Image (cartoon, rainbow, N blue to C red):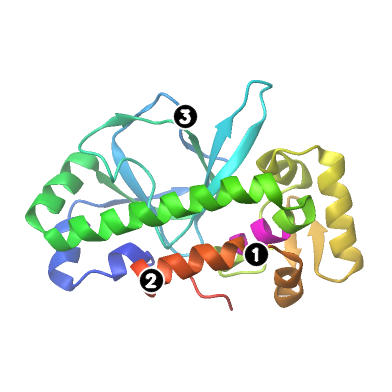
Amino acid sequence: MGNGLLAALRPAEQTLLVRHCSECVLDAGTVICQPGDEVEYCTLPTGPALCCFSVALDDGAAVETMLVGREGAVGGFASQGPVPAYARVEVLHGGVFRRIPLGKLEAAKRASPVIANLFARYADCMMAQVFQSIACNATHTIEQRAAKWLGAAVCRIGDSHVTMTQEQLATMMGIGRSYASRVLQRFKHEGLLRTRRGGIEVLDRNGLKNRACSCNDRVSAHFERLLGGIYPARA
């Protein structure tokens, strides 16, 4: 199935959800929802598909708050029925996504305490990511945050190539492009990565991890305690 949440369920519970799922292919840059949009579907990335939550600021900048890949889902799964979106959700790495109408998801949660418990635990894991992101943005250096973000992306994608430009990385981190460019140039000089048109290729994952803060490790450890085996293992 390519999605950790679905794979964590037993066949009977999987059937309750999968029979109502549809598949769609979304390219990088596709906006799944904007703030204020009524969310009607729970969307689950599969395989290398990756999306990001970002929050708009008064000056027009948008700061990344959370990445979601095949370990999770986006869109109203913790509520009961359609709700307005608070953040922008955009596809960062294209791929296949599964969608289930929120009404069908709620019916499945009522029919199965196992499904309800799974999504409640995942909601807790998402909150942990948000809390960790707030602490990270407030205390860690741009270099640490860039290494953390790229490490989290390649971990979820399962590949060393991230479809992300320097300008997009700067926007995601809420910093100027010149700052992002200097950090990437430093990483390139150290042989940690190389940039290509429209993308960044990580050459040394362990080296990049050593330059990052411990925020990814803290988040993955929380996933492991609540939802063992869901968070993608670092290759």
Mark 1 vs mark 2: which is more N-terminal?
1
The percent coordinates of residue 215 (x first, y second) are 60, 61
The magenta span reads 147-153
Residue at image point 42% right, 66% down: 223
The percent coordinates of residue 32 (x first, y second) are 45, 38
Which dot, 3 or 1, sits closer to the camera?
Answer: 1
Q: Vertical placement of 191 versus 31: above or below? A: below
Q: Along the line of sight, which residue is nearer the eye, 13 or 27?
A: 13
The C terminus - image quarter: bottom right
Q: Along the line of sight, which residue is nearer the eye, 196 or 58?
A: 58
Label 3: which secondary element: loop
Residue 28 in sight in this render: no
- Image check: 214 left or right of 76? right
**Mark 2 nearby-residue class (10 Å; few <14, some 14–19, many ≥20):** few
Residue at image point 36% right, 74% down: 228
Mark 1 to mark 2 CA distance (whole Å): 21 Å
**Mark 3 nearby-residue class (10 Å; few <14, some 14–19, many ≥20):** some
Report which residue position mark 3 lands on: 34
- Image check: 231 left or right of 182? left
Residue kind at label 2, given as amino acid type = Arg
Q: Which mark is residue 179?
A: none
Residue 163 in sight in this render: yes
Report which residue position mark 2 lands on: 225
By secondary structure, the bulk of the magenta-drawn segment is best described as: helix
Q: Vertical placement of 91 versus 9: above or below? A: above
Q: Which mark is residue 151?
A: 1
Mark 3 to mark 2 CA distance (whole Å): 32 Å
Q: Along the line of sight, which residue is nearer the eye, 138 or 157?
A: 138
